[in-house]
């Protein structure tokens, strides 16, 4: 049985973030295929943390810049190590390479952080985003460096796959498009006339979500209220919502801020439309796939659907101006035929793009192929080998310096 170690950025919170749900999907995939799964993190548990031990996952608390992680690696001797985001690869990747040189190293990106943050900066400055903004963002080189230092990088977004291949020149052998792993539809969802109201949701720690709620509150919802039935409400759900957003709760205006709920799927199934007016971001959006799972069409933006499919064949509508967003929301909310077509498109979309069995097998086949040919796979990664050379090992030597400094403080 192969041992797999996942070095986690945080404890997975599947009920608060798409990233948390994604991590649970990966854990479940490994457990289902008889891996011995170990999860190590520097982060503390929260009230929303998943109970990994109950699933059969072995847990280990670890510390930054400490030789204790080396001892842990020597004892565990994993066959595969997954770094959950590039920061973890920077901190622990060189230790894995030294202690377990034969272990397959995988980077799980969630999204390209540098791309998301470059877009956020452009949005704040009210400038149109250009790829040049991404090239010059301080995190871009760090993120690309982590990708080159790993044997395989997992990407949820088709767009980000193309970006790395076409703009950076990373060879496809070192990248794998692995979107959400979702089960096929197993039950009927509430029909059009059994639903009412609009819904938006997302983790309040994620800047694109807060911006989206702000846009809804100040610009979109006032216009929608004028044209939708008087009793229509917009429901806002999400963990860690900022206090400012909580204070926008206003039943008289139909703007309902609820915060976190355990039964989010039930709430989404009761709504007629998911609204996701995202103005910046990266990766693919869990809120849109959850809408499809619940049979709830979405109104979103070009950024919202990036990396997920064709804007002209979206199960809902893609709108890129304020007027278009408002007009299309009203049209889809009131037109049952249009709504039903979008719902069916959503079910088909999940089957075509996020089929759990199909995507899981693709991933396992890729793992097996790399393990079987690991020597030649690594030999061809010239830039990765350059980054591993002593002259370019800044992250390693900074980590060693801090480790020794910490020892001196005890």
Image (spheres, rainbow, N blue to C red):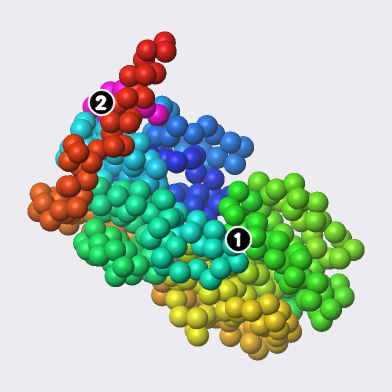
Res. 84 image quadrant: top left
Res. 402 image quadrant: top left
Q: What is the magenta range?
A: 64-75
Dominant SS in magenta: helix
Graded by Cα atoms within 10 Å as few (under 14), some (14 to 19) or many (20 or more), the crowding at tag 1 reads few
Residue 368 position in % (x across, y down): 19, 54
Residue 150 position in % (x across, y down): 26, 48
Q: In this view, does 6 lie to the left or right of 365?
A: right
Q: Which of 259 and 224 is in front in this view?
A: 224
Which residue corresponds to the image point at 38% horizontal and 69% vertical from the top-left? 158
Q: Within the magenta stretch, is there residue 379?
A: no
Which residue corresponds to the image point at 76% horizontal and 50% vertical from the top-left? 244
Q: Do the residues labelled 1 and 2 touch (CB within 8 Å)?
A: no
Give the residue pinned by disc 1.
124
Give the quadrant of the N terminus.
top left
Residue 259 position in % (x across, y down): 71, 51
Name the element at disc 1. helix
Give the residue pinned by disc 2.
75
Give the quadrant of the C terminus.
top left
Q: Residue lying farthest right?
A: 252
> Where 22 sits versus 219, above or below?
above
Which residue corresponds to the image point at 48% horizontal and 59% vertical from the top-left? 118
- Sequence order check: which comes first, mark 1 or mark 2? 2
């Amino acid at each position: 049985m192969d041992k797999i170690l996942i070095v986690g950025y945080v404890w997975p919170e599947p009920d608060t973030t798409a990233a948390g749900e994604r991590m649970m999907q990966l854990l479940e995939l490994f457990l289902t295929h008889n891996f011995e799964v170990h999860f190590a993190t520097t982060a503390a548990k929260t009230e929303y943390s998943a109970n990994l031990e109950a699933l059969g996952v072995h847990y280990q608390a670890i510390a930054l810049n400490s030789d204790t992680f080396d001892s842990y690696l020597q004892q565990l001797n994993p066959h595969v190590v997954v770094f959950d985001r590039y920061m973890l690869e920077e901190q622990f990747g060189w230790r894995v390479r030294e202690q377990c040189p034969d272990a397959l190293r995988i980077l799980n990106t969630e999204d390209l952080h540098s791309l998301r943050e470059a877009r956020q900066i452009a949005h704040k400055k009210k400038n149109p985003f250009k790829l040049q903004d991404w090239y010059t963002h301080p995190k871009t080189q760090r993120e690309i460096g982590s990708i080159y230092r790993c044997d395989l990088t997992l990407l949820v977004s088709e767009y980000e796959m193309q970006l790395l291949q076409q703009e950076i020149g990373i060879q496809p052998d070192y990248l794998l498009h692995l979107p959400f792993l979702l089960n096929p539809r197993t039950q009927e969802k509430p029909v059009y006339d059994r639903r009412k109201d609009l819904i938006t949701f997302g983790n309040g720690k994620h800047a694109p979500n807060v911006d989206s709620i702000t846009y809804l509150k100040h610009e979109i919802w006032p216009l929608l209220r004028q044209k939708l039935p008087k009793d229509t409400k917009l429901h806002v759900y999400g963990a860690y919502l900022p206090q400012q957003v909580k204070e926008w709760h206003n039943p008289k205006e139909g703007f309902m801020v609820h915060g976190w709920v355990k039964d989010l799927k039930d709430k989404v199934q009761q709504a007629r439309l998911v609204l996701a007016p995202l103005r910046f971001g990266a990766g693919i959006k869990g809120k849109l796939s959850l809408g499809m799972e619940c049979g709830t069409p979405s109104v979103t933006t070009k950024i919202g659907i990036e990396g997920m499919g064709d804007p002209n064949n979206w199960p809902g509508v893609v709108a890129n101006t304020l007027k278009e967003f408002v007009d299309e929301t009203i049209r889809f909310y009131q037109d049952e035929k249009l709504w039903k077509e979008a719902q069916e498109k959503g079910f088909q979309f999940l089957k075509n793009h996020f089929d759990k069995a199909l995507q899981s097998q693709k991933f396992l086949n890729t793992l097996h192929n790399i393990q079987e040919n690991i020597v030649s796979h690594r030999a061809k990664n010239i830039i990765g080998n350059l980054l591993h050379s002593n002259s370019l090992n800044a992250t390693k030597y900074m980590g060693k310096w801090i480790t020794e400094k910490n020892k001196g403080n005890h």
